[in-house]
Image (cartoon, grey):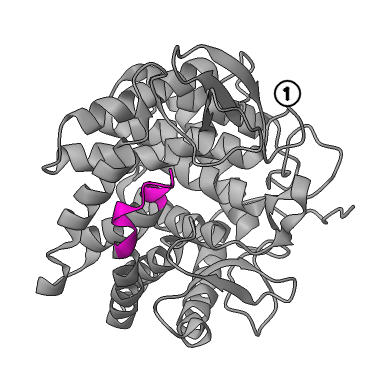
Amino acid sequence: MLVLAPAPCAVAGGSLDALVDQALRVSLQRLEQSVREVGAPVLYPTYGTPQLKWQLKSSADWTSGFYPGCLWYAGELSGDRRFEAWAGQWTKAIEREKFNADTHDLGFRFMCSFGNGIRLARGPEYDRYKEIILTAATTLARRYNPRVGCLSSNWDLVKDQQAFPVVVDIMMNLDLLFWAAENGGPLDLAAVARTHAITTGRDFVRPDGGTYHVVRYDKNTGRIISKGTLQGAGPETTWSRGQAWALYGMVAAYRHTRERPFLDLAMKLADYFIRNLPADRVAPWDFQSGIKYHDVSASCIVTSALFEMLRYVQDPSRRAHYRREAEAMLASLCQPPWFATLTDTSCLLDHSVQFLPINSNVDVPAIFADYYFLEAIIRYRSGQASGGGR
């Protein structure tokens, strides 16, 4: 059992800007270095080793979109056109996944890569990005069961032929469906995403604001069979990254629909996450576990979500509260031990947890932590410039 030392998180005056600037300078250097380390633009960083070296997989892995997403963000943050060229190279190979009906994580793959490319890229070579995203969204929508009101998970540890398993992570993939419906795809894609979000809010969120990781439904009737966790500590605990996925997904659902219940749920989820944070403002891997690992990725996801949520929260006191918490989390993430200090690494952040119950990638870097860390910086800077959230 590992207990990590707390990092300072106090933010005074302009010190957060200095922390962000320093972390970003190092991050850009490491991302440039990563292009040489990764090599072939058909391989993608997933998790780091204990020595802070990236493990690489193909586009078939659920994490493949995050690395090109990091490169797109690096270009946005630096203005260096080399990052755009590299991002385009690593984005291209993901196109083969647009017909992959065996996964619920097409949103991660396509919105982090092609989605950012549409937003940031220039030139005729990017004209097909929209068509690719629309195809991926249509593929994802095939997982929808109208009796349940959800898209199904592509994996479960419980073998039940009658069960229709749904994991809270799918909230992060709804953005693909919403975007597609708003940009020339079938309008019923948005209806699928909206219904999935409503069902998740009803069935996954506990009265105290914590969340279940998995809910299993009867595929024929929609009746709930069981609730629990796959990657957390126990059936009634709250796995922190699952909580982060739920919060971020509800903020995105509000962005696309402007329906107040989604924002109310996002604030309820945020309040739970913040209320259960330790003094260092970096989440434990599970909020109720006695095994004291942190999961930096959960705090990166929530920090980014909070900076967007600031744009929508109207009450001045609540908005100020969420801003303080987001800035305190970002300050911690910019410093050791969370921001990696090893000089010979392409990883930005350390101490994430993929799947502790099976001892898979525990206390190592994760590419999605780096992605949402960079996104949080972009949203923080945007908010500083505009006086609001991005």
From the viewer's perspective, is residue 287 above or below residue 340? above
Instruction: Give x and y (percent) for residue 208.
Output: 64, 17
Tell whether 112 sits left or right of 332. left
Which residue shows up at 60% across the image and 74% down it? 54
Q: Secondary structure at mark 1?
A: loop
Outermost residue on the front side: it is: 161
Q: In the image, is residue 104 part of the stretch drawn in magenta?
A: yes
Which residue shows up at 21% across the image and 59% down it? 118
**Crowding at label 1, few (<14), some or many (≥20) Cα neighbours within 10 Å?**
some
Q: Which quadrant of the view contains residue 143?
A: top left
Q: Which residues are magenta?
A: 96-108
Q: In the image, is residue 319 part of the stretch drawn in magenta?
A: no
Tell whether 254 sits left or right of 44. left
Tell whether 299 sits left or right of 170. right
**The C terminus - image quarter:** top left
Instruction: Give x and y (percent) for residue 192.
Output: 29, 27
Q: Nearer the viewer, residue 44 or 103?
A: 103
Asked if one can make out residue 7 in the rendered structure from this viewpoint, the answer is no
Q: Which quadrant of the view contains residue 220?
A: top left
Instruction: Give x and y (percent) for residue 248.
Output: 46, 38
Instruction: Give x and y (percent) for residue 304.
Output: 47, 47
The three-letter code of the residue at mark 1 reads Glu
Q: Nearer the viewer, residue 245 or 385?
A: 245
From the viewer's perspective, is residue 156 above or below residue 130? above
Which residue does the numbered mark 1 point to in the structure image?
Answer: 236
From the viewer's perspective, is residue 248 above or below residue 18? above
Which residue shows up at 39% across the image and 28% down it? 313
Which residue shows up at 63% across the image and 19% down it? 226
